[in-house]
Structure formats: structure tokens, C-alpha cells
Image: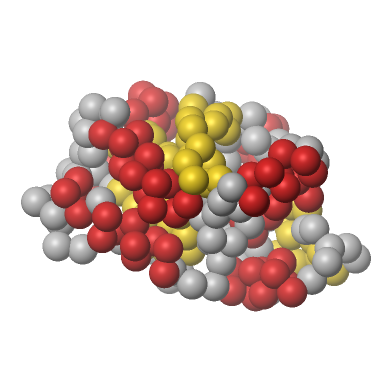
Amino acid sequence: MSIRIITDSAADLPAPYRREVTVLPMTVSFGDRHYQDGVNLTHRQFYEQLIEGDVLPITSQVSPGQFAEAFQSAADAGEDAVAITLSGKLSGTYQSACLAAQDFPGRAYVVDSENATIGEMILVERALELLDQGLSAPDIAARLDREKKSVRLIALLDTLEYLKRGGRISPTTALVGGLLAVKPVVAVREGEVVVLGKARGSKNGNSLLVQEIEKTAGVDFARPYRLGYTGLSDALLQKYVADSRQLWQDHAESLPICTVGGAIGTHVGPGAVAVAFFCR
């Protein structure tokens, strides 16, 4: 039986998508202006509004109805469905998918990625690899549930301003961080965002990011990996790629790079760089 891979736009999957993939958009709202992420709001348009405007955007989860419609569309086409969602600890999207899947027993399977943006993306890409290997929908879901434990997402943030604007840190902390050019390094662990450390300046931040990657069991270059950035320029990411050359130059001629959209960009702001990979 054919298989449909369904995910949400927080995975930041670059278009065009494979025909087996359906991406359900999250809603990004700037005040009373509401957009469908990736449909009528591109990543570039999001950052232009974020940087130029005074209103902090908010995001809304994918609804159970959206998942139900996608599951029904797959069933009507004679397809089983595997849905891979943004971490259930960061969004209600996973619960929406689970609620919808109850009406499609044996036909719809839901995987909590326990990750976000490019960490979620590489799990979707891994699902497509398993699909190409001929695995069934329940087997793909089971494999993803096991393999997601080896996914690592590590990011260097450029500013604390958006965490302050979202009420995540105090204005005093943000002011001190800005004066000292502090760059926090964060990761996603068991579905939640954790702070690994802080560095003064982008150069030290890049070094800390490399150090955190080196602490892992190593990058499995045989499975998907990805780099991402927020904002309108990839200059900071290109600097990181050059600084971290020793990690990848013997394994790949170039690195796959993409932009991080509004679902996560709302909370970290422009100028962040991130890497996601499966550990060996």
C-alpha cells in the first residue's frame, strides 16, 4: 500500500516537496493579521515583518480538523499515513494529530518528533528514506520513534531580545546580554529547549557550538543532516560552516542549508544558526 508522509510547517521542509509529502501550515499572526506559514507568508516575508514591525508575532498549532482532512485525503487515495509533528512539549500540534488519528485506526500513525525546525525536518527526510526502502507505515513510525532519540539539534542565538519580548527572560538580563554581546547556545532535549552555555561574541559562540557537537557520539553522515539559519542573511551561518570545516570536510563536499521559518523564528529572532543531525 502507498504511504503518505504528513508533517507541519514547523519542520521548515524546503519546497518543492516530494509527491508523498503533505505539509500542514501553522498560523502566524502579527496582531490582527493572520497568515498560513509557508502558504501566504514566506520565510523572508516573516523576517521582514519581524524586523521592521513593533508587534511580536504569535503562532497557532495545526488543528485536529486539518489533520483529519489530510488523513481522509490519504485514505481516499488508498494510502496509509505517517504524521510527524513538532515536539508535543512545544506545541499542541502533536495532540491534534493524535485526536484526528483516532478516526483512522490502522491507517494513520503519529510520531512526536520531540524536536523542532530542522531537527523535525531530518526525521521527515528519514521517513522518506525508510519509505523508499519499502517499509510499511507502522514500521516507519516504529523506526522513527526509536531513531529520533539519536537526533541532535544545537543552535547559536544572535540575540536575547526576542526571548525578552516573548517574556522568556527579564529586560535586565537581555540588556546585560546585549552589552556583553552574549550569544546563548541552546539545544532540544527530550522535546524541550535547554541552554547549553553562553559565549561572548559570534566567534566564541561558533567555537562553543563546535564543542557541543564534538561532545556527541559524532555525526552520522549516512542519515539526513541539515543546517539552518534565521533572518535575511546567511552570513553568520557561512562563517560557522568555515569555522567547523574539520567536522565535515572528510564526509561531504557541501552542507545542506535552509531557512528557519516563523514557527521557531518568532521565539529566537533573526541571526540564529542551527545544526541538526543523527548521532552515530
Q: Quadrant of the C terminus?
A: top left
The vertical placement of 213 against 235, above or below, is above
Q: Indicate left or right for 196 with 213 as reference.
A: right
Residue at 29% from the left image edge and 29% from the top image edge: 216
> Could you tell me residue 274's position as x and y percent?
43, 50
Viewer-proximal residue among 128 and 3: 128
Quarter of the image holding residue 49? bottom right
Q: Position of residue 3 (x, y in %)?
A: 40, 47
Is residue 52 visible in the rendered image? The answer is yes
In the depicted view, which residue is nearer to us: 70 or 178? 178
Q: Please say which color scheme the image uses.
A: secondary structure
- Does residue 204 appear left or right of residue 94 in this picture? left
Residue 130 in which image quadrant: top left
Q: Is residue 242 left or right of residue 188?
A: left
Q: Residue at x 22, y 33 (%)?
A: 218
Nearer to me, 100 or 192: 192
Residue located at (70% from left, 69% from top): 51
Q: Looking at the picture, tell me which residue is in the foreground, 216 or 170.
A: 170
Which residue appears at 78% of the width and 50% of the height?
A: 165
Most extreme residue toward the front is 179
Residue 109 x %, y %: 51, 34
